[in-house]
Image: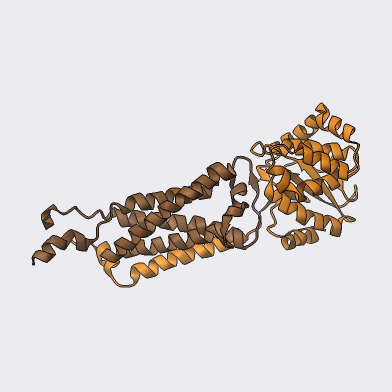
Chain colours: A orange, B brown
Amino acid sequence: MRTPRDHLLASRGVPWIGGSLLLLLAVAALYLFTGAAASEPARTPPPGADDISFGPADASLSVVEYSDFQCPFCAQYAAMLKTLREKYGDQVKFVYRFYPLANHPWASITAKAAYAAFLQGKFWEMHDLLFENQKEWAESDDPRPYLDAYAQSLGLDLDKFHADADAQSTTDFIKRQAAEGKQGGVSHTPWLVVGDSVVLPRSLEEFDKLIQDAL
Amino acid sequence: MTRAESPAPRRWVPWLLAGAAYAGFVMSLYLTFVHYRGYVSPCYVVKGCEAVQTSKYSAILGVPLALLGTVFFALMFYLGIGLLTGSRVRVVQAYKVLAFVGALAIIPLFLLQAIVLKAFCTYCLASEAIMLVLWVASFLLVAPELRAAPDARAH
């Protein structure tokens, strides 16, 4: 016996139009969803004296980033941030904080290398080298030869570089920043804080506008 | 086989197939948007999507796999509607062929994640699970013409 539902299904056009509307609804919803930039109040510590930073110490605006050198998306954001550092480096304080993820095997060793470079005044140079060449060391079985090569290209004292990278104080610094980040709700990298808001700009243009609006 | 002996139509099967295809469409479409908008997604603490999404295997000849998945699931969804509105032999056959193609595609997709990339993307695994469901459930499909065929021929 045919039910009213059977009649509806059998009526020409109705199921096809309904199905098409469902597909269009999904397209519209995802178009809006993927276009929205996230923003929420930050719970991580504000920039402090011991932070690794770029730009004026007394800048009215800060951009804090929790990042992982082996994270591919951090590498994409690093390129954006490099552009923004060059553009706003005299007005904005850019802060880098370590947040090595456990599922990235070379995240920790590269964080230590970057901190060791920081101790010789070459953090941002090492930061850029690590992100720009991420694919080569990230896919290797041992990233240390690459790290040594980057250190040498920056003119670092290699013995001090190794000693600093292996020092307990380096491990403690990285762990403290990661722990503070975790406590502040960091759940992914990059975790970006512009002023006192957590943001996730989807493009350089969007990131630039966020900074301009905050200045 | 007489009409009395023919298998009873499983009315829930087309609904399951259309619903599963819709879920697959939504997931693939999400990844397609992420790809084409050029947006970057974060690396989550426990997920490996970033390794899969950014790998060189995420596109074939410049066409993202997510887009191919979107087209595949949209086709399966419309075929599902075709089944709901009164399946014909051609619709059932087309469904079975496409479901089999989808099931075949699971093998390289899964092996790429497991062996080459050593990382699993939740969305990819979910899409592959849906493809598997579509293929398995397609065995339950029998066109009304085929069920009624012996009797129809007799008259």
Examine the image and state in which quarter residue A154 appears: top right
> In this rendering, does residue A151 appear at all?
yes
Expressed as whole percent of the image width and height from the top left, the position of residue A120 reads 90, 39
Which quadrant does the C terminus of chain B fall into? Answer: bottom left
Viewer can see residue A114: no
Quick check: A85 above or below B47? below
User: Is A6 in front, or is B91?
Assistant: B91
The residue drawn where x is 78% and y is 47% is A64
**Is A193 above or below relative to A156?**
below
Q: Dividing the picture into quarters, in which one does residue A161 lie?
A: top right
Rendered residue at 88%/32% (across/down): A159
List the single residue furthest toward the left.
B155
Count of picture labels: 0
Q: Position of residue A135 (x, y in %)?
A: 70, 48
Task: Write the residue at 70% across / 56% down.
Answer: A201
Instruction: Say left or right for A65 vs A35.
Output: right
Residue at far top of view: A168
Seen in the image, is B98 located left or right of residue A71? Answer: left
What residue is drawn where x is 30% and y is 72%? A12
Residue A168 appears in which quarter of the rendering? top right
Report x, y in % for residue B125: 49, 47
Quarter of the picture holding the N terminus of chain B: bottom left
Is residue A162 placed above or below A136 in the rendered structure?
A: above
Q: Is residue A165 left or right of residue B6?
A: right
Seen in the image, is A17 located left or right of residue A167? Answer: left
Residue B113 horizontal/vertical position (percent): 54, 45
